[in-house]
Image: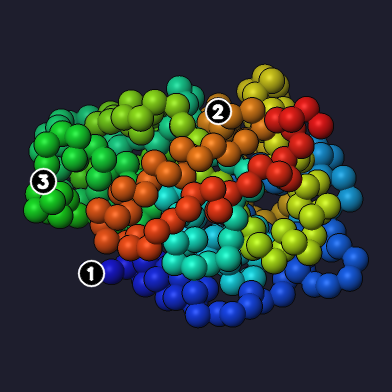
């Protein structure tokens, strides 16, 4: 059965292909460059653009929050159709949407996996699940389908000898990130994907153990990028450069600043934006996981997912990876 999230993803992908023009957004109009960029946030979390703005790294460019997103694929769909001005997702989802004809380009990496920031597949401490083969017939909860977590799961199963027929018997279910830990503890799911502050909070509560992590599987890698439409890049190059370079500075600030200070800053951001959120989980933050200086994008960051998408039958067109990302607006890696 296809989830509602995935149905929406497919429908909006088709819409992006069918549209001959992208809806004009705040930063997409003609004349002088717009200085406001619309975006979606995450409840209880602080995104890199939000951190960059609070640190004063965005200069005269302002962010306009229009609501919270439910997943990376939904976020970039909204960017592709002009509902917001930038969105971020797992790079495999970016490749899929661009391969379907959406007029988007990745402009900066914003999350990844390292020794501190990674996504793990967790089970209860007393769970009988201890290997890939034990997952056959089990329920695995993740925030969305067709994105980072499902890609990592498929790679793990394949590398451990499971064929397509066996892999299809591992049930993947969508569960909101804030409900993931509870769903596991109530035994509604056999395995759940936890990352970042939600992972560390769950581990601090005890009673769970990792089956495997994406860092164990692939090592350190940049996993997701922010995308914008090509139209926006063309009509607002100075605004985009300010935004991308500001986010790049925020990435480096987070790497060189003590974690406790970063946590204090992000907690203050959540409190003053008045969105009726719980900021408790922020105290577990350790890293955004972006390995490349300033979030610069490498071709391999996106190309690694092409084979996975083709194996799933979700990428039938030829995709030129170099056409769907750019570092030209990022002034930090070049020392500008």
Between marks 3 and 1 in the image, the one whose residue lies nearer the viewer? 3
Quick one: quadrant of the C terminus?
top right
SS at circle 2:
loop
The residue shown at (24%, 37%) is 156
Mark 2 vs mark 3, CA separation in Å: 32 Å
Tell me which label, 2 or 3, sits earlier in the chain: 3
Q: Residue 274 lies in what quarter of the image?
A: bottom right
State the residue in front, 325 or 111: 325
Badge 2: how crowded within 10 Å, few (<14), some, or many (20+)? many
The disc, 1 or 2, on the residue closer to the chain's N-terminal end is: 1
Asked whether the viewer can see residue 228, the reply is yes
Q: Is residue 311 above or below residue 1?
A: above
What residue appears at the point 25 percent right and 45 percent down from the top-left corner?
A: 154
Disc 1 to disc 2, C-alpha distance: 36 Å
Q: Nearer the viewer, mark 1 or mark 2?
A: 2
Q: Which residue is mark 3?
A: 163
Residue at figure coordinates x 15%, y 34% from the top left: 160
User: What x and y, as percent, mark residue 255?
Assistant: 65, 24
Q: Is residue 167 left or right of residue 284?
A: left
Residue 291's disc is 2
Residue 83, x across and y down, in percent:
64, 71
| Secondary-structure class at tag 3 | loop
Q: Residue at x 32, y 67 (%)?
A: 3
Q: Position of residue 249 (x, y in %)?
A: 74, 33
Q: Nearest the camera: 319 or 64?
A: 319
Q: Quadrant of residue 59?
A: top right
Q: Residues within 10 Å of mark 3 (few under 14, many from 20)?
A: few
| Secondary structure of residue under mark 1 | loop
The disc placed on residue 103 is: none
| Depicted 103 relative to depicted 165: above or below | below
Quarter of the figure with the N terminus? bottom left
Residue indicated by mark 1 = 1
């Amino acid at each position: 059965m296809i989830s509602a999230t995935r149905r929406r993803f497919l429908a909006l992908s088709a819409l992006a292909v069918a549209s001959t023009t992208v809806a004009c957004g705040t930063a997409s109009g003609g004349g002088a460059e717009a200085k406001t960029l619309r975006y979606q946030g995450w409840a209880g979390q602080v995104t890199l653009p939000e951190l960059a703005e609070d640190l004063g790294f965005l200069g005269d460019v302002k962010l306009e929050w229009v609501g919270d997103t439910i997943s990376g694929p939904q976020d970039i769909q909204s960017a592709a159709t002009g509902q917001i001005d930038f969105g971020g997702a797992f790079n495999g989802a970016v490749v899929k949407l661009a391969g379907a004809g959406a007029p988007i380009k990745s402009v900066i990496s914003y999350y990844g996996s390292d020794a501190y920031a990674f996504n793990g597949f967790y089970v209860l401490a007393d769970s009988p699940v201890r290997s890939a083969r034990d997952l056959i017939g089990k329920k695995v909860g993740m925030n969305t389908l067709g994105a980072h977590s499902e890609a990592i799961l498929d790679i793990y199963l394949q590398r451990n000898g499971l064929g397509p027929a066996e892999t299809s018997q591992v049930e993947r279910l969508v569960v909101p990130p804030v409900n993931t830990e509870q769903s596991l503890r109530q035994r509604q799911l056999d395995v759940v994907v936890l990352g970042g502050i939600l992972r560390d909070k769950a581990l601090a509560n005890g009673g769970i153990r990792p089956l495997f992590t994406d860092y164990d599987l692939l090592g350190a890698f940049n996993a997701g990028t922010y995308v914008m439409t090509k139209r926006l890049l063309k009509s607002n190059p100075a605004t985009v450069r300010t935004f991308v370079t500001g986010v790049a500075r925020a990435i480096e600030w987070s790497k060189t600043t003590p974690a406790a200070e970063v946590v204090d800053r992000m907690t203050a951001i959540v409190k003053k934006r008045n969105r009726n959120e719980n900021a408790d989980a922020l105290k577990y933050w350790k890293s955004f996981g972006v390995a490349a200086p300033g979030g610069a994008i490498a071709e391999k960051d996106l190309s690694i997912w092409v084979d996975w998408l083709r194996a799933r039958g979700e990428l039938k067109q030829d995709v030129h990876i170099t056409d769907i990302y750019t570092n030209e607006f990022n002034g930090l890696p070049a020392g500008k």
